[in-house]
């Protein structure tokens, strides 16, 4: 089998165009420009790239964005003070604190301080709870991007066995929750570093979502012929970016696969723009 390549770059572009169009209509109706405030502490090179891409995407879609750059020596209190200012600023609709934060700062404390109605990452426990209960305020960006890829490429999910590899708060856990929701109706297994016979579990999957952060962990023999493989990993190996899936081996067995780069990655930013617009719309009309 030669897997169909799921073109995340193109699907993300289309999604961003839709958001851009909706943002324009909202601005024409209300005079409000949806505005994302991103906070970058220190200068982690990968974070620099992510934040720059987010700014560029906002600009292209006609959303406002401001980047707050703080030195790596920033104290937790200073960061909390900035979050409080952004929470109180009526012109800011979405707040994103780029992770990872320097080690002397407790990420949970900072993320919990973001007002839930501006939490466009959907990391706040209130938003996680709402999502888990199937009444989301915001959908977490990367898992929502994966769902969009499955939907656009018409991958059936009802009754299908989805195996999620990885149990992070950012991807694995919310990914499993979204696949489980009514209407999606997958049967979900979550694997992690302590899972026994992970290869055998993966071979049972109709859909594999690899999000564990180990380069090329998923080999061809772990994939059932005809399965759909979604690779959330972005790993730098030498001067190359590789996913959590061995791409060449997987292509020979899977029916469809996301490439790295150009698969899930671009979708994350598209979903962030969607959440920022949604935040602006609901802050304008809290009951709506
Ligand atoms: N660092 C890596 N991924 C993410 C993400 O989705 N959101 C934030 N805020 N930081 C990240």
Image (cartoon, rainbow, N blue to C red):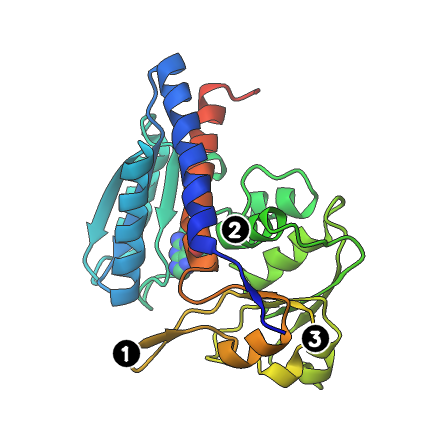
Q: Would residue 62 appear left or right of 156 to someone viewing this image?
A: left
Q: For marks 2 and 3, give the CA distance.
A: 24 Å
The residue beneath circle 3 is 225
Q: For marks 1 and 2, give the CA distance.
A: 26 Å
Q: For marks 3 and 1, give the CA distance.
A: 31 Å
Quarter of the image where one finds residue 114? top left
Q: Is mark 1 within 8 Å of ligand 1?
A: no
Mark number for residue 145? 2
Residue located at (37% from left, 59% from top): 99
Where in the figure is residue 61, as x and y percent of width and height? 34, 35
Q: Is residue 281 above or below residue 126?
A: above
Give the mark nearest the N terminus, 2 or 3. 2
Mark number for residue 239? 1
Give the mark nearest the N terminus, 3 or 1. 3
Residue extending furthest toward the top: 29
Within 10 Å of disc 2 (Cα), the crowding (few <14, some 14-19, many 20+) is: many
Is residue 284 something that shows in the picture? Answer: yes
């Amino acid at each position: 089998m030669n897997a169909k390549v799921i073109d995340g770059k193109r699907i993300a572009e289309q999604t961003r165009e839709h958001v851009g169009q909706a943002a324009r209509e909202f601005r024409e109706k209300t005079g409000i420009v949806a505005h994302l405030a991103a906070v970058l502490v220190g200068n982690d090179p990968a974070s620099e790239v992510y934040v720059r891409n987010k700014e560029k995407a906002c600009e292209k879609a006609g959303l406002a964005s401001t980047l707050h750059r703080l030195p790596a020596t920033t104290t937790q209190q200073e960061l909390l003070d900035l979050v409080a200012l952004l929470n109180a600023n009526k012109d800011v609709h979405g707040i994103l604190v780029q992770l990872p934060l320097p080690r002397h700062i407790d990420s949970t404390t900072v993320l919990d301080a973001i007002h839930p109605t501006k939490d466009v990452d959907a990391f706040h426990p209130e938003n996680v709870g709402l999502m888990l209960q199937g009444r989301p305020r915001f959908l977490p960006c990367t898992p929502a991007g994966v769902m969009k890829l499955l939907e656009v490429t018409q991958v059936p999910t009802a009754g299908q066995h989805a195996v999620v590899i990885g149990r992070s708060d950012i991807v694995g856990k919310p990914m499993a929750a979204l696949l489980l929701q009514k209407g999606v109706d997958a049967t979900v297994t979550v694997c992690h570093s302590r899972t026994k016979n992970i290869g055998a579990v993966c071979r049972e999957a109709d859909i594999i979502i690899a999000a564990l952060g180990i380069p090329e962990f998923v080999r061809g023999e772990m994939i059932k012929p005809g399965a759909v493989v979604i690779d959330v990993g972005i790993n730098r190996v030498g001067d190359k970016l590789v996913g959590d899936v061995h791409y060449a081996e997987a292509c020979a067995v899977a029916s469809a696969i996301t490439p790295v780069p150009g698969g899930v990655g671009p979708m994350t930013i598209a979903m962030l723009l969607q959440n920022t617009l949604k935040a602006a719309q609901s802050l304008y009309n809290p009951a709506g």
